[in-house]
Image (tube, grey):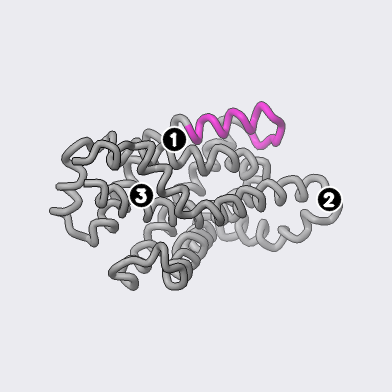
């Protein structure tokens, strides 16, 4: 094995670089939206239909939102951007849609849990608590290990044998750790902005960022397999 290629920071960094342009756009957009929502008079009204729809439909709205942002939109990216084209396009897109919608429901309950734990305020202390719990407890313990297995499986073109062979040697170092490092690079600058929105808008805003993150995860699965 080439140790340089298998370096976890290198794997994570290469995945971020492959999507650096949309990453910067998403960072700027979510921060600008949060500032505009609270600072520009009348701007919050633009989001009112979305907020009401989410409140009325709960988990099913979260499912539909994440299916669209993290399933349909990435499918369009995969179809049009040559650098991230993939084998088994249709099957992977369908699985991505179902996977994303399911996680939308999970996050619907997770955000509600955080609201009960830390309150619904938008002050700096509350944002720091929610961001820290999200990024340094929830993400490394729950999100990264589970999602990386899924994306490694897709990156191995659904071959369990290839996935197992890829994961067998240095799984934490080559797969899980790059996922965590890349997650922090993408989400720490933006997740606080997501939590700055009212609870009913956090799922839709998170979907915008998660659209980009799903592309990074696909890159991680492919690069982890290629690093062998």
Q: Residue 101 placed where, x, y %?
A: 44, 59
In the image, 197 versus 211, the foreground residue is: 211
Residue 40 marker: 2
Name the element at disc 1: helix
From the viewer's perspective, tell me whether residue 69 is left or right of residue 165. Answer: right
Give the magenta-colored segment's residue range. 119-135
In the image, 176 versus 3, the foreground residue is: 3
Q: Residue 33 placed where, x, y %?
A: 71, 51
Image point 48% across, 47% down: which residue? 107
> How far apart are the two marked residues, 2 and 3, measured between alpha carbons?
38 Å
Callouts 1 and 2 close, C-beta under 8 Å: no
- Residue 88, quarter of the rendered image: bottom left
Q: Residue 128 placed where, x, y %?
A: 61, 29
> How far apart are the two marked residues, 3 and 1, measured between alpha carbons?
20 Å
- Residue 12, quarter of the rendered image: top left
Classify 10 Å Cα crowding around label 1: few (below 14), some (14-19), many (20 and above): some
| Nearest to N terminus: mark 2 or mark 3 | 2
Which residue carries the number 1 mark?
Answer: 138
Which residue carries the number 3 mark?
Answer: 220
Name the magenta segment's main secondary structure.
Answer: helix
Image point 64% across, 30% down: which residue? 126
From the viewer's perspective, tell me whether residue 153 is left or right of residue 41. Answer: left
């Amino acid at each position: 094995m080439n140790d340089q290629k298998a370096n976890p920071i290198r794997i994570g960094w290469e995945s971020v670089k492959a999507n650096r342009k949309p990453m910067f756009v998403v960072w700027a957009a979510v921060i600008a939206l949060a500032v505009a929502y609270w600072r520009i008079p009348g701007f919050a009204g633009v989001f009112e239909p979305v907020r009401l729809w989410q409140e009325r439909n709960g988990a099913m709205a979260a499912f539909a939102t994440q299916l669209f942002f993290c399933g349909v939109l990435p499918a369009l990216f995969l179809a049009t951007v040559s650098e991230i084209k993939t084998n088994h396009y249709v099957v992977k897109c369908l699985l991505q849609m179902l996977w994303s919608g399911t996680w939308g429901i999970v996050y619907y309950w997770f955000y509600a849990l955080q609201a009960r734990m830390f309150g619904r305020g938008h002050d700096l202390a509350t944002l720091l608590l929610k961001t820290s719990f999200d990024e340094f407890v929830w993400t490394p313990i729950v999100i990264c290990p589970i999602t990386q297995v899924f994306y490694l499986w897709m990156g191995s073109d659904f071959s369990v044998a290839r996935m197992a062979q890829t994961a067998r040697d240095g799984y934490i170092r080559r797969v899980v750790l790059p996922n965590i490092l890349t997650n922090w690079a993408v989400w720490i600058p933006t997740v606080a902005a997501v939590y700055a929105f009212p609870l009913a808008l956090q799922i839709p805003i998170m979907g915008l960022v998660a659209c980009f993150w799903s592309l990074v995860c696909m890159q991680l699965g492919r690069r982890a397999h290629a690093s062998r």
